[in-house]
Image: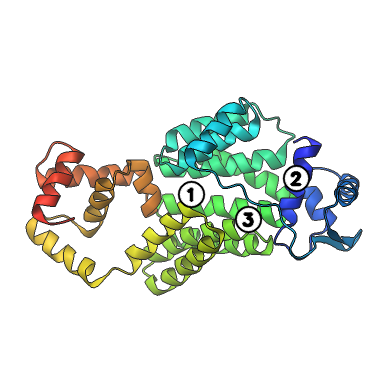
Amino acid sequence: MNRTDRLVAMVMHLQGRRLVRAEDMAGHFSVSVRTIYRDIAALGEAGVPIAGEAGVGYSLVKGYHLPPVMLTGDEAAALFDRSGAHPAASLGRAAMALDRGDARSAAELTERHLRRLPAKNRTERAGALELLIRAETALGGDHNRARSALVELQGIADTAHTPPLLASASLAVGLIALAEHDADPARRALEDAVDLFEKSGAPFEAARARVGLACALESLGRTDAAVVEVSRALEELTRLDARHEMAAAQAVRDRLTPTPAQMATPGATREKSGLTTRELEVLRLISSGLSNPAIADRLCISEHTVHRHVANTLTKLDVPSRSAAVAQAARLGLL
């Protein structure tokens, strides 16, 4: 990360945080404390209103912020294309691929990014490693690559020992446990991730971790607690206008709090077709145009599990394809 990028990142890091010590920023950005002091001075000379002092901590004066840039998916893609091989662009393409449900492309793009990123760039590698783990867990399978990435991420977090990196590592542990249907370890890790992200002043990341926590609680049969967590996540994501994550959180809450009509449907479904509640849920998402990786991400299950549900659904409805299954379900009044 060059100095200009770091200065902008420091302002963003300070946003929403009450007080950040120079030592914590040094660990987060993998630079010396003296470098942080120089950067703080440079930001002050540039007119950024930073309050605080060496040895105590720093914060932005209340009301100051970098305005967000709101781009559509097409606009963001065009921006990344114009940016060529810039590291931020390559990682941005990977994140966009994961958002649209293409976990395989996201994993491949992130791995390529990591191959070009020196091992000494620990903070930048940490963000890419977390993204790789999110993509690999969405893909399903044996999660060996996700676990390899986790080892490196945990090593970075343990060395720096800053709340943001520890939060990222806890999130990764939780996502892998959740993908492997190990609900209680997932719950513990995701609870730690939420606490650490909140301590770091990272509301978006905390909200996203809460959605995963809700899925873990659901798997443990603790529906009421899951509803509380996903509702808190949805409230924060709505405040941040994080629309993609809002949709994912809303889907989880809808699943946890079905309407009376939705609650009546599964019984009728079993009588008409033999579909389970989960198979019907997958079928409805197929009818919405979602791919298997996107369905896996939405339902907090592995892509392999989605594939099995789809195969069972095709067999039970006696149809040859996903589109035929949707058409048959519509004829039966299941959608």
- Which quadrant would residue 226 be assigned to in this image? bottom left
For the residues labelled 2 and 1, say whether their Cβ atoms are less than 8 Å apart: no
Q: Secondary structure at mark 2?
A: helix
Q: Which residue is mark 1?
A: 176
Q: Disc 2 or 1, which lies upstream in sequence?
A: 2
**186 to 130, vertically: above or below:** below
Q: Amino acid at mark 3?
A: Ala
Cα separation between marks 1 and 3: 14 Å
Q: Residues within 10 Å of mark 1 (few under 14, many from 20)?
A: many
- Label 1 or label 3, whichever comes before in sequence order: 3
> Is residue 292 left or right of 112 when viewed as pictured?
left
Residue at 61% over, 51% down: 168
**Of label 3 and label 2, which has the lower sequence position?**
2
Q: Residue at x 52, y 60 (%)?
A: 237
* Residue where numbered disc 2 is placed: 8
Instruction: Answer few, some or many: residues within 10 Å of disc 2's Cα (few below 14, many 20 plus, some between 14 and 19).
Output: few
| Residue receiving disc 3 | 167
Nearer the observer: mark 1 or 3; the answer is: 3
Q: Label 3: how many residues lie within 10 Å, few (<14), some (14-19) or many (20+)?
A: many
- Answer yes or no: is residue 302 visible: no
